[in-house]
Image (cartoon, coloured by chain):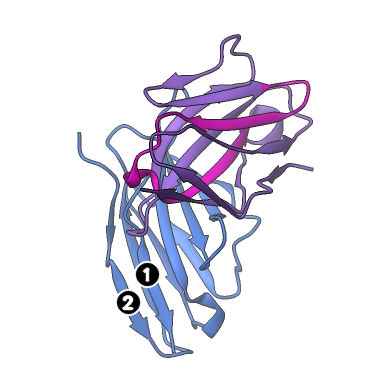
Chain colours: A purple, B blue
């Protein structure tokens, strides 16, 4: 069964330090995509980064990088040089490929608090 | 490029009333999604359209929820009659045809009293 697990309900990080948000997934579909979204208190869902299951390199987008360990089925988000504006909810999501009907599910989220 | 548009942004109704939400996806995005996000939880997919056809509505409570995308562009989600537990944010998203990255609208916050 398709499943996304985010085990950290909340995380604290000091401004300018790096933080890793955990995400593990489970799927039997060989083709899938992994996403991270940021949701500030305003409620909008902001796309951060994407990793395809066949991508050889870990995805990076500015201060965001995705630590993709396929054998362990983990897709952790690394935020470098944290800023106060990074305080928000972060959701990991997985979209299966054609075998799975392109279904998408989201994890329960991790709330990140950045301290000044 | 314009993002995903949703209206209204907020809605307060009493239980057993009806409500409808509207979504206009990003131009060129064939796939449209409606999600329900209850406070403190991740979004839950209600229905997914590919053009004007339904791809997945397995988690849509069909006794009270309905959705349509008649011309393959904008979409309407309706709840009739509403229950207290329908209080949530309803998010609409559309995805590009290559990476299928989903881009979300601002959401509609529904409060059922």
Residue B68 sits in which quadrant?
Answer: bottom left
Placement of the N terminus of chain B among the 4 image quadrants: top left
Q: Residue at x 39, y 34 (%)?
A: A16
User: Are discs 2 and 1 less than 8 Å apart at CB?
Assistant: yes
Find residue A27 and report its image quarter: top right
* Bounds of the magenta segment: A69-96
Instruction: Report helix, strand or loop for mark 2.
Output: strand
Q: Residue at x 60, y 74 (%)?
A: B63
Marks 2 and 1, Cα distance to the nearest angstrom? 6 Å
Residue B3, can we see it?
yes
Which label was assigned to residue B109? 1
Badge 2 and badge 1 in a common chain: yes
Instruction: Classify mark 1: residues with Cα within 10 Å, few (<14), some (14-19) or many (20+).
Output: many
Q: Is residue A74 above or below residue B10?
A: above
Q: Nearer the viewer, residue B87 or B29?
A: B87
Q: Position of residue B43 (x, y in %)?
A: 53, 55
Choose between B75 and A71: the one closer to the eye: A71
Residue A97 in the image: state x and y as whole percent: 64, 28
Q: Which residue is under mark 2?
A: B11
Tell me which residue sits at (72%, 21%) in the image.
A70
Q: Position of residue B22 (x, y in %)?
A: 32, 61
Task: Name the chain letter of the residue that bears numbered label 2.
Answer: B
For the C terminus of chain B, the quadrant is bottom left
Most extreme residue toward the top is A56
* Side (left or right) of A88 relative to A32: left
């Amino acid at each position: 069964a398709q499943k996304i697990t985010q085990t950290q309900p909340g995380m604290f990080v000091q401004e300018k330090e790096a933080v890793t948000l955990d995400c593990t997934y489970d799927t039997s579909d060989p083709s899938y995509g992994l996403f991270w979204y940021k949701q500030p208190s305003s409620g909008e869902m902001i796309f951060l980064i994407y990793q395809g299951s066949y991508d050889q390199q870990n995805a990076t987008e500015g201060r965001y990088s995705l630590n993709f360990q396929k054998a362990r089925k983990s897709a952790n988000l690394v935020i470098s040089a944290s800023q106060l504006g990074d305080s928000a909810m972060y959701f990991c999501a997985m979209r299966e490929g054609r075998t799975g009907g392109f279904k998408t599910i989201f994890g329960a989220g991790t709330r990140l608090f950045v301290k000044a | 490029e314009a993002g995903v548009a949703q209206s209204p942004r907020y809605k307060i109704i009493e239980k057993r009333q009806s409500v409808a939400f509207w979504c206009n996806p990003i131009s060129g995005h064939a796939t449209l999604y409606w999600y329900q996000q209850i406070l403190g939880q991740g979004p839950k997919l209600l229905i997914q359209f590919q053009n004007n056809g339904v791809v997945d509505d397995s988690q849509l409570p069909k006794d009270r929820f309905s959705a349509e995308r008649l011309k393959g562009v904008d979409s309407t989600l309706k709840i009739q009659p509403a229950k207290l537990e329908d209080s949530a944010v309803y998010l609409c998203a559309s995805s590009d045809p290559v990476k299928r990255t989903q881009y979300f609208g601002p959401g509609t916050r529904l409060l059922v009293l």
